[in-house]
Amino acid sequence: MALAPAPETTSSTDPSADIGSGGWVNAPELRGFVLALFFIFGGITSLNDVIIPKLKDLFTLNYTQAMLIQFCFFTAYAVVGIPGAMFVKRIGYMRGAVAGLLTMMAGCLMFIPASRTGIYGLFLLALFVLATGVVLVQIVSNPLISLLGPPRTAHSRLTFAQAFNSVGTTIFPFVGSILILAPLAAKAGTEAQPFWDVTRIVDPECRGGQQSTVVPTAAYRIAETQAVAHTYVGLAVALAVIATVVWVLRNRLKGERHEVTSLAGSFALLKRPRFAFGALCIFLYVGAEVAIGSTLVNYLKSDHTLCLTEQSAGKQLLFYWGGAMVGRFIGSAVLRVVSPGKVLAGVAVGAIALVLTSITTTGAISANTLLAVGLMNSIMFPTIFTLASEKLGSRAADGSGIINVAIFGGAVIPLMTGGLADATSLPFAMLIPVACYAVIAVYGIYARRPAAD
């Protein structure tokens, strides 16, 4: 998505924010709004990491079946990415954000009938609708934050915004573990931890990488999934409030002009090697990050690592996503002085080393090294996005749409990881993220120099 330069800049007394002659918007108040959007869609996306172990136990799913949660969620990026970009170009950024927030709200409310019926398929449908709204919000957010400042600092600014995304991904799973996984902890015969406690509590029933469970009845599923429904209803209320505020501010941004292109014209960008390679790396990065995050609770519950209780394992997600948050704040400064391509290659190699260490060790070392991958993930998405989008100019809207389609990797790679885990073991399945990071490291080296005009 891109905004064409307007003829004149807007004075400080003008109630709207217009695009200056340099092709970027001088509107500090809108930066706060966009940072809030990053916080929201990041948090809701990472909440899947808590839902997966919850529904896996309640519906007695294997890893492949449980990963359908991520498959349905991230499939929305493939289905909605390009049409969503066209839709936002038609109605504008602010109205597009409202549409996305309302769609997210609808998806959250669909958890009510899903819980009352206890049907797994309805949970998957609710997640798809919720993700549709997330896609619309993300289509608005990524290019808009790039425009809210000089082009030369776009890498740093987007990384800083992604840090707020990571605040959401850190907070939501932690709170979700308290609200959603506590009932399962009680079922296992252990007391729920105080909400502030991240002590690693061992499950006495952990034997041979498995935990003894009672086969849930339909009535039990309905009762237990109420915790999921209540959590998402609370989110729906918050989204309604935010959508109202954004609607009030819908006319704050002036001078939007988007290049009109066809669907075929959008995909024509894939003829550009730098952009096509970057889109592939977005596919692989999101897939690897989601695959690890989705399996972390079960990974930490296994006797390969720590044999933790469900809730205690869920709270450890704080360190995985928290590492990404810290790394993005640091990265926003590092990327101002170091070539983004070199930084990308370095963190990708670091991620490979950590995952391989986790696979080949056991206990606390295995657990901690996999959690530390979050720190390596920190700058990958914003750096790949900006490297791939360099020199797109007025085609940035179409580029953003393609990038959002590439986020479909979050559906494919976790499903592949789950299938390999069912066929072999969960630690061995982590070799799939390793392969993804290897390709990303190559892209960092390839894109270390500025794009040609």
Image (cartoon, rainbow, N blue to C red):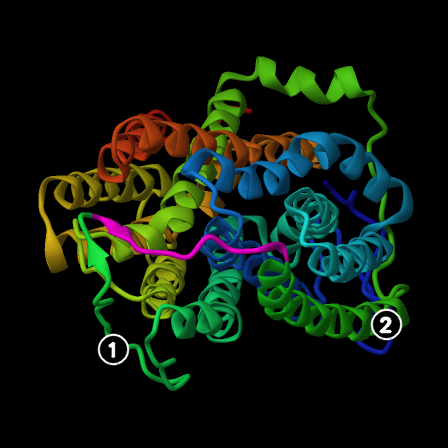
Task: Find disc 2 in the rendering and name its residue.
Answer: 244
The reply to whether residue 327 is visible in this rendering is yes
Tell me the SS state at disc 2.
helix
Residue 215 lies in the magenta-colored region: yes
Q: Pointer 1 and pointer 2: residues touching (CB < 8 Å)?
A: no
* Range of residues picked out in magenta: 209-218
Determine whether 312 is above or below 352 in the image.
below
For marks 1 and 2, the one nearer the N-term is 1
User: Mark 2: which amino acid?
Assistant: Thr
Location of residue 195 by image quarter: bottom left
Residue 394 lies, in percent from the top left, at: 73, 34
At label 2, counting other C-alpha atoms closer than 10 Å, the crowd grade (few under 14, some 14-19, many 20 or more) is some
Task: Find disc 1 in the rendering and name its residue.
Answer: 199
Tell me the SS state at disc 1.
loop
Determine whether 314 is above or below 302 in the image.
below
Location of residue 237 by image quarter: bottom right
Q: Disc 1 and disc 2: Cα gap in Å?
A: 40 Å
Horizontal side, residue 276 vs residue 36: left or right: left
Residue 232 lies, in percent from the top left, at: 67, 66
Q: Of 331 and 84, which appears nearest the observer?
A: 84
Q: Residue at x 38, y 32 (%)?
A: 417
Q: Residue at x 62, y 49 (%)?
A: 142
Q: Characterize the magenta stretch by its predominant secondary structure.
A: loop
Residue 201 lies, in percent from the top left, at: 24, 73
Residue 152 lies, in percent from the top left, at: 51, 49
At label 1, counting other C-alpha atoms closer than 10 Å, the crowd grade (few under 14, some 14-19, many 20 or more) is few
Q: Residue at x 81, y 57 (%)?
A: 106
Location of residue 411 by image quarter: top right
User: Mark 1: which amino acid?
Assistant: Thr
Horizontal side, residue 311 vs residue 428: left or right: right
